[in-house]
Image: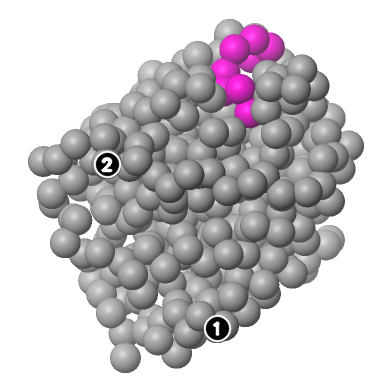
Amino acid sequence: MERERGGTAGIMAPDLTQRRINWHSERLKERHGDRVWRLGIDAGFTCPHRSQDRQRGGCRYCAPDGNIAAYQKGLGCSTPLSLETQISRALAFTSRRYGARAFFLYFQAYTCTNAPVSALVDLYERGIGICRRLIEPGQLKGLVVSTRPDCFDQEKAALLASFMAQGLEVWVEFGLQSAHASTLAFIHRNHDTKSFLDAMEVAQAAGLRRAVHLLLGLPGESRGQMVDSARFTASTLPDGVKFHDLRIVRGSAFARAFEAGEISCMHPSRLPGLLADCLEVLPPAAEIIRLNADFRPEETILIHPPPDKHRLALQVEEELARRGTFQGQSFDRTIRGTIRGQSFEADIETGSPAPPAGP
């Protein structure tokens, strides 16, 4: 038995009463006949609240290098290497380590729609052209563009949608991080939830697949507030969701705040239960892209040993099995279409009291 997916018409999602989590990797293998690997690159973008040289400003939690892929580390965050060099590095890494034969080109670092459309056309087309020249015909399966909701509009959506005519699966990934206005202000996101809702609607109207980033463990947020951010995300019927747990990245504004004793980090032992709570309220058709952040040890201030991503996935599956629940079990379809008609922001600010931070 299958259920219709809410984001893109005509696509069906698996029946999760017989399984626990709708994994993105499994759906990609079904759609493309092989496991798909992302080729993450830094195309030289900045963020609208960062300086042009990318050295100042931005979100308080963000890495100075814009969270580029590990195999591109050390390239320098001011002047990235050419697209061809980066794509070649990404291909060499994924092919050598995983035997990869199917790829998504992933514009990953900073805000990858933060430029005029004329410049974006050139960047995206050059990247796609380089990929197709370096790999076998048919191995490039899709395009992924990571961005902020306040740097997206109908013209940019139409540009991304145009690449679907080339047979590519096109995703746009929006960083929301939290649905709470006080948190968005505290972490210096410089956008609100309305811009997120607008961007999700524009992307859906263009036929794009839409993924949402949520950041768990942000200072001051209770467990209830974090789950409510997932519930808010669910109201937009996303095609995919990425969870990151907060890490204190060296060189970030949060690193300075942590060293001054102003903030702390959630203990990783809380993640399996919290993630299970979040998954239960998401749509069953939303593809789960990741459950936690992925940094090299030297890039963060090591407060607690970070969870292994494979072990964490198993722990979350086991927690859902223990509860007898699954992704989407508590998804509330009735909130769809009414979210703009009510003060949802006021509702979600009344989350339950924050539990102890843990050891």
> For this view, does 246 lie left or right of residue 26?
right
Q: Which residues are magenta?
A: 54-61
Q: Position of residue 117 (x, y in %)?
A: 36, 24
* Residue 57 lies in the magenta-colored region: yes
In this rendering, the answer to whether 71 lies above or below 264 is below
| Residue hosting label 2 | 347
How was this image coloured?
one colour
Q: Secondary structure at mark 2?
A: helix
Per the picture, the main secondary structure of the magenta-coloured stretch is loop
Q: Which label was assigned to residue 335?
A: none
The percent position of residue 271, horizontal first and vertical second, equals 63, 58
User: In this picture, is 3 found above or below 351?
Assistant: below
Q: Which residue is mark 1?
A: 321
Mark 2: which amino acid?
A: Asp
Residue 159 visible in the displayed image: no
Would residue 190 be seen by someone viewing this image from the given angle? yes
Residue at disc 1, secondary structure? helix
Q: Is residue 208 left or right of residue 39?
A: left
